[in-house]
Amino acid sequence: MAIERITSKGQLVPLKFYDDAVDASLTDQQMSVNETAATGIHLVDGYTMPFAGSIVAVTADLDSAATVGTLSVGATIGGTEDANTTIAITTLATHSKVIGRRVVEFAAGDIIGAEITSGGTWNGTASDLLVVVWVLLQLENI
């Protein structure tokens, strides 16, 4: 019996971001990876990547849908949103977007985050939001 050393060339990893009671009239507000509802303290707003890779999907889930207004979410690399990852949210509670492999690449050491922009008429201000940025880490050189 032969034993082979086989390593995956990539690992799909979900990076989770939260916002309690999404306010109206926000512009490029960074989301946090953990938030205490009682204090509203944003502890950390990104993940440092140990390997190079690609952002391959973004999903967004509200605990209740708004009835009026717009909200957009997108992944950030080093604090700057990549337009290929932006999701426009209106009156649905769940959204997802798949991005092709190698369309939105990042380097080892980059910080991946997520940000929110909401219009002045957004009325989902009691809604809590979960955004997951799905990254494919490249493991070829380890």
Image (cartoon, helix red, strand yellow):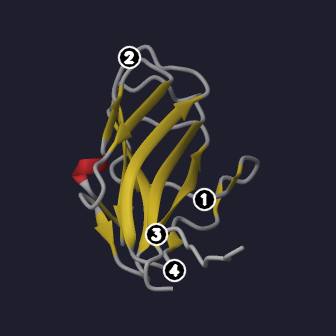
Q: Residue furthest top?
A: 67
**N-term mark: 1 or 2:** 1
Residue at 56% across, 54% down: 14
**N-term mark: 4 or 3:** 3
The circle drawn on residue 9 is 3
Type of amino acid under label 2 = Val
Q: Secondary structure at mark 2?
A: loop
Quadrant placement of the N terminus: bottom right
**From what the image shows, is residue 40 above or below residue 8?**
above
Type of amino acid under label 4 = Pro
Q: Secondary structure at mark 1?
A: loop
Pointer 3 local density, CA inside 10 Å: few below 14, some 14–19, many at least 20: few
Type of amino acid under label 3 = Lys
Numbered disc in front, either 1 or 3: 3
Q: Which residue is mark 2?
A: 68
Q: CA distance from mark 1 to mark 2?
A: 27 Å
**N-term mark: 2 or 4:** 4
Q: Do residues under tags 4 and 1 come within 8 Å of each other at their CB atoms?
A: no
